[in-house]
Image: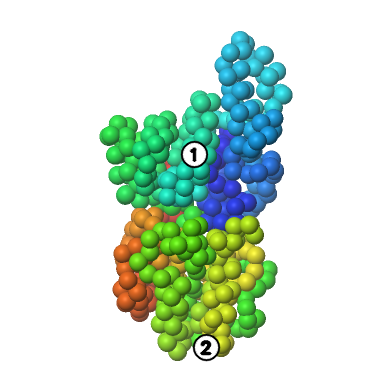
């Protein structure tokens, strides 16, 4: 069994995407223990990655699909297209196999039994720009062009603000044999695009990152290097999104927040640190390349830490290491309460039964939190002003014991549901 995974990789610097990649591998191996798994499309160069999944060492190949100016790359999109046309025209299996021996990347796709796609969890939309959407569409379309079985894994669908993106999205959805959405809004979006056709293969499933296993880092790399609970018995984790901290890619409140994000996170920190038993742990979750600093959570956390440390000496910490997705989940697991603007940072908390508040900039938060029965823990920054945010945070913090008890009952059921996705 050869299974290709689209829309997930381990080289983006976004630990949420890493978490989705590993969790996808986990459910594939749960269903087909001997499967060969290929990460298709997202990497820059062919490579192999070894990782431990559910106690088992797994080697996964990455096969790029490139769109560069060098069309002679053997893994260029146009090479894949050319080979597919030739394979269609050539008579006889022997001639086709002879051709495939000339290009191992096209052979991998040709011999794939199943392709699954997760589009980074939330990128099957045009809110991040047309370029990202179109490149994602072309990779999916290529798999369909090769005639492969195609499944859309649980993710967010839409919004699609342009008629062209709605048209292209519909083309992909109609080619999928099964479509899973991680929220009810996604189901409504899909059914609207398909005009009710094929709705029998559109289903709900929780976000698969609930399956990710934590792994303690060899060095937690906390700053300052002292006992996290020396000055308080309650550890509150705060994930600051570098993207929101900088106003989005356009740096001018790109997502239309009703609040000043920088001011808001400072007000939240002041609110929580007013409780004498609280210490604050700043937790980054996206570590982009240096050329994309606008997205950098570590840079935002360092700046924020510098603003706070003199006022709250010994009570503010920062996770300052370069963590894997498993390790950052372990760091988050040290918290008693958590707030985050990166959704998968929040999932890392919820899946460990830690009450979490989603400081949301898109609709994707609502469906994921709703699946865990804590939809009231989403604070919509598109609709709430500063006072509404602070009121909600205080209420949820003071009711955290009840939320923890609820999550301890619900999360194991979600995890069983995800593992049974293809049973």
Q: Position of residue 414 (x, y in %)?
A: 40, 55
Q: Nearer the viewer, residue 95 or 301?
A: 301
Q: Position of residue 66 (x, y in %)?
A: 62, 37
Measuring from the top left, give residue 393's x and y in whole percent: 36, 75
Q: Which mark is residue 113?
A: none
Judge the density around disc 2: few (<14), some (14-19), many (≥20) Cα neighbours within 10 Å.
few
Residue 117 appears in the rendering: no
Query: Measured along the vertical axis of the image, is residue 57 above or below residue 91?
Result: below
In the rendered image, which quarter is residue 255 located in? bottom left
Point out the image quarter for the N terminus. Answer: top right
Report the side of 86 relative to 272 (left or right).
right
Q: Is residue 105 above or below residue 406?
A: above
Residue where numbered disc 2 is placed: 311
Residue at image position (36%, 38%) is: 163
Whether residues under marks 2 and 1 lie with C-beta atoms below 8 angstroms apart, the answer is no
Secondary structure found at label 2: loop
Above/below status of 286 relative to 171: below
Instruction: Identify the residue at horizontal 49%, vertical 54% (top origin).
Output: 209
Q: Work out whether residue 112 or residue 83 is closer to the camera in this orientation and state it.
A: 83
The residue shown at (50%, 82%) is 279
Residue 233 in the image, given as x and y percentages of width and height: 49, 84
Marks 2/1: CA–CA distance: 47 Å
Can residue 383 be seen here? The reply is yes
Location of mark 1 (residue): 134
Q: Quadrant of the C terminus?
A: top left
Q: Residue at x 55, y 65 (%)?
A: 297
């Amino acid at each position: 069994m050869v299974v290709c995974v689209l829309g997930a990789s381990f080289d983006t610097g976004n630990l949420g995407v890493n978490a989705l990649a590993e969790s996808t591998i986990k459910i594939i191996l749960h269903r087909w223990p001997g499967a060969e798994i290929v990460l298709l499309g997202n990497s820059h160069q062919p490579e192999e990655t070894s990782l431990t999944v559910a106690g088992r060492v797994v080697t996964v190949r990455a096969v790029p699909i490139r769109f560069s100016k060098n069309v002679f790359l053997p893994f260029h999109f146009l090479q894949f297209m050319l080979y597919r046309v030739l394979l269609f025209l050539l008579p006889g299996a022997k001639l086709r196999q002879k051709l495939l021996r000339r290009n191992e990347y096209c052979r991998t796709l040709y011999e794939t039994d199943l392709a699954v796609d997760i589009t980074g969890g939330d990128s099957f939309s045009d809110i991040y720009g047309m370029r990202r959407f179109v490149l994602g569409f072309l990779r999916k379309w290529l798999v369909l062009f090769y005639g492969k079985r195609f499944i859309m894994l649980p993710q967010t669908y839409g919004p699609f603000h342009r008629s062209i993106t709605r048209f292209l999205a519909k083309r992909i959805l109609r080619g999928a044999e099964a479509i899973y959405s991680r929220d009810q809004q996604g189901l409504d979006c899909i059914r609207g695009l398909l005009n009710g056709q094929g709705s029998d293969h559109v289903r709900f499933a929780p976000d698969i990152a609930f399956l990710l296993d934590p792994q303690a880092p060899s060095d937690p790399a906390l700053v300052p290097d002292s006992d996290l609970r020396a000055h308080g018995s309650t550890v509150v984790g705060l994930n600051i999104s570098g993207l929101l901290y900088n106003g989005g890619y356009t740096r001018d409140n790109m997502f239309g927040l009703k609040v000043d994000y920088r001011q808001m996170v400072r007000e939240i920190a002041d609110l929580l640190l007013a409780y004498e038993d609280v210490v604050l742990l700043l937790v980054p979750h996206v570590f982009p390349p240096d050329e994309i600093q606008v997205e950098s959570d570590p840079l935002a956390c360092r700046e924020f830490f510098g603003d706070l440390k003199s006022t709250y000496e010994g009570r503010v910490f920062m996770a300052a290491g370069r963590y894997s997705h498993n390790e950052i989940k372990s760091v988050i697991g040290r918290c008693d309460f958590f707030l985050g603007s990166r959704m998968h940072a929040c999932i890392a908390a919820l899946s460990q039964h830690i009450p979490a508040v989603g400081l949301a900039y898109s609709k994707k938060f609502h469906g994921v939190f709703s699946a865990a029965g804590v939809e009231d823990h989403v604070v919509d920054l598109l609709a709430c002003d500063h006072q509404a945010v602070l009121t909600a945070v205080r209420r949820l913090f003071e009711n955290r014991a009840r939320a923890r008890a609820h999550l301890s009952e619900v999360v194991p059921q979600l995890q069983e549901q995800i593992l049974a996705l293809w049973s």
